[in-house]
Image: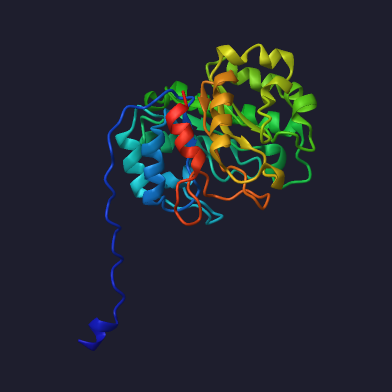
Amino acid sequence: MLVAACLPRAPIAPTPLPILAWAAHDARRGMDLSPKTPLQPTDYHALDVVQPGSVVLFSAQLGDGDPLRQIGVDAQLQAWLAAHQDVVQIVRMWPVRGPEDPRRLALRIVKLHLRFPWITWFQIANEPDIEWATERTAWAQIGAWAEAVWFEVERYRQLEPSAADIKLLFPPLAQGSPLDPENIGYDALRPAIGLYLDHGDGLAGHEYWDRDDVYLVEDRWPGWLQARLATIPFFVTECGRRPLVSNGQPDDLLGRELVDFSARTRARVVAPFVLSSPDGSFDQFDFVDWQGNLRPHLFVWGALGP
């Protein structure tokens, strides 16, 4: 009896949360899901308030693994995604902190799609111009890597019927980064971007603005790219206010700014991400604060969004 009493107890699985049924709105009324594990009941309440037409999530939340140990598998989220297949679901591959072996990344994408066949959109990386941990990061390196990933995934799309409907998003670049994507980067990456867009894949973008000044970063991109935005799968997978002290707390006005942005952008998907905090940094509680309270802009976005 003493031995039995000293044995570790089996972990108790969390009680599944109820999943409410509703019809998805326009994909321009989206949400980026928080990178916390697991999502909390208040996060699902936020989803029920907005009833988004699109969501962006992390591959680690689907069980893809995270060597950084920052994001874990979320079984409740997976059940939610299965119940809301009418929502456009976009997987941000995580982490891709350098030019990961294109074959390995392609296989990760194919395996995820095999497990979750209704999910077809995959963003291959995130802001490589600042997130790649190498001093040798340059536009030529980013472009060559993105092309290599495309060819590896295309090989699966041609050979494996289950992979034929996979869609890729060319990665978003960091607005105003030291490598200057607006004036140099997009032009340097034109052949790689063209490879994606000419074959039915898409482009992801990040657009941040300031309080009372909702400018479109896409309007600063080269003319050849702007000319294509209205006719291609262009998804804004992050947006909101820049993380500056002067931009203040997320508030009702921010909700109206999101509505304004969604009406003016040429994007088919608009997914607000981790929005500005009063201390001038990003946090992982975008629509829900540290205490689990829904933030004011959530209700405006849910009531007035597309």
> In terms of depth relative to the viewer, which is nearer, 170 or 21?
21
Whether residue 151 is visible to the viewer of this picture, yes or no, is no
Residue 23 position, x and y percent, is 32, 27
Pick the front one: 68 or 74: 74
Look at the image and tell me whether residue 23 can be seen: yes
Q: Is residue 145 above or below residue 200?
A: below
**Image quadrant where one finds the N terminus:** bottom left
Q: Is residue 122 above or below residue 45?
A: above
Residue in the picture at 67% in, 42% down: 247
**Which color scheme is applied?**
rainbow
**In the image as oriented, which residue stretches furthest toward the left?**
1
Quarter of the figure with residue 232: top right
How many badges with numbers are in the image?
0
Residue at 59% x, 42% y: name it: 275
Q: Residue furthest bottom?
A: 2
In the shown orientation, is residue 14 left or right of residue 170? Answer: left
- Judged left or right of residue 284, residue 303 is left
Q: Residue 209 location in percent, x, y?
A: 67, 33
Residue occupying image coordinates x 65% and y 40%: 99
- Residue beneath the point at 66% across and 36% down: 211
Q: Nearer the viewer, residue 272 or 71?
A: 272
Please provide percent x and percent y for residue 281.
66, 50
Residue 30: image location, x then y, percent? 47, 31
The answer to which of 213 and 42 lies nearer the viewer is: 213
